[in-house]
Image (cartoon, helix red, strand yellow):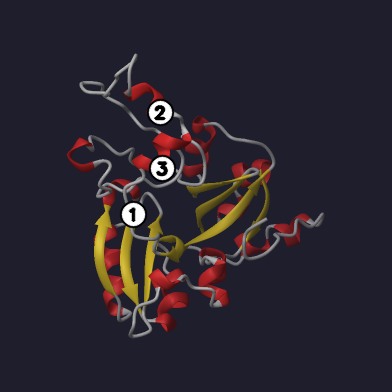
Amino acid sequence: RLKSRTLPVTADRGDALRTLEEIAPGTRRTVLLRLEDEVSALDRGAMEQEGVRFRQYLGDRTWFAEVEGGAVDSRSVESRVRAAWSIDPTDRIDPALLGGAIPGWALRPDGRLAVSILAFGDADLDRLAADVLSLGGEVQAIAEPFDTLHAVIPREAATSLASLEAVHWLEPLARAPGPEMNRARAYLDAEDMIVVPYSLSGFGVEVSINDRGHAWPSHPDYSSRWVQGDAGVDPLSGH
């Protein structure tokens, strides 16, 4: 199930794979694939040799995948693919943008939208930035380790932007980060550790944070302590 719709799986295999049959020979298209079972990296490599390149995992054996025309007749598709669906731009847009429930911090005075654009890991971010400009947008930052662009776009450009092959997800820009340590210390009862008899300050202790979701490199709590961000991590699953 996507945020935009429920994907039906029909018992008729011809109907289930019709999306792949419609891809013209010599062309490639990014679609949604539901597999019969989970596949290993070795299995995915074998399928890529037959024209199916996996781009992003969605869960429940479902992937964004780039499929070559004619791959529907391959042995891998025949034995491993349960169903396939075309991607609608609304599948890649946060419902807040579609429904008009845009948070105030993501709405500019001139009516434009401040957005985060999550690209597929194999996307050319510079080319995607050029596409944003061609749609009347303004790129404010490129977070290459997270395959993400932060941009301001005309409201009417959202659907066109989500139609680009490079785009995985489009959402309102997150609220501007602010220091959180005082609130966190109270929540964790850490105040007890900085007074007698413990008198701990944390000085000289190095901490690594590895959590699900996006990390914001410019957050004041990180400051110059930011060392490394994982490249190619799926922000929708724990890592």
Mark 2, residue position: 190
Mark 1, residue position: 177
Q: Position of residue 47 (x, y in %)?
A: 52, 41
Q: CA distance from mark 1 to mark 2?
A: 22 Å
Q: Secondary structure at mark 2?
A: helix
Which amino acid lies under the numbered mark 3 shown in the image of this protein? Answer: Arg
Q: Quadrant of residue 203?
A: top left
Q: Nearer the viewer, residue 223 or 226?
A: 223
Which amino acid lies under the numbered mark 1 shown in the image of this protein? Answer: Pro
**Quick one: label 3, few (<14), some, or many (20+) residues within 10 Å?**
few
Name which of mark 1 and mark 3 comes first in the sequence. 1
- Please, is residue 111 above or below residue 48 in the view? below
Mark 3, residue position: 183
Using the rendered image of the protein, determine whether residue 229 is visible from the camera's viewpoint. Answer: yes
Residue beneath the point at 29% across and 57% down: 124
Q: Is residue 193 left or right of residue 50?
A: left
Residue beneath the point at 33% across and 38% down: 230
- In front: mark 1 or mark 3? 3
**Quick one: label 2, few (<14), some, or many (20+) residues within 10 Å?**
few
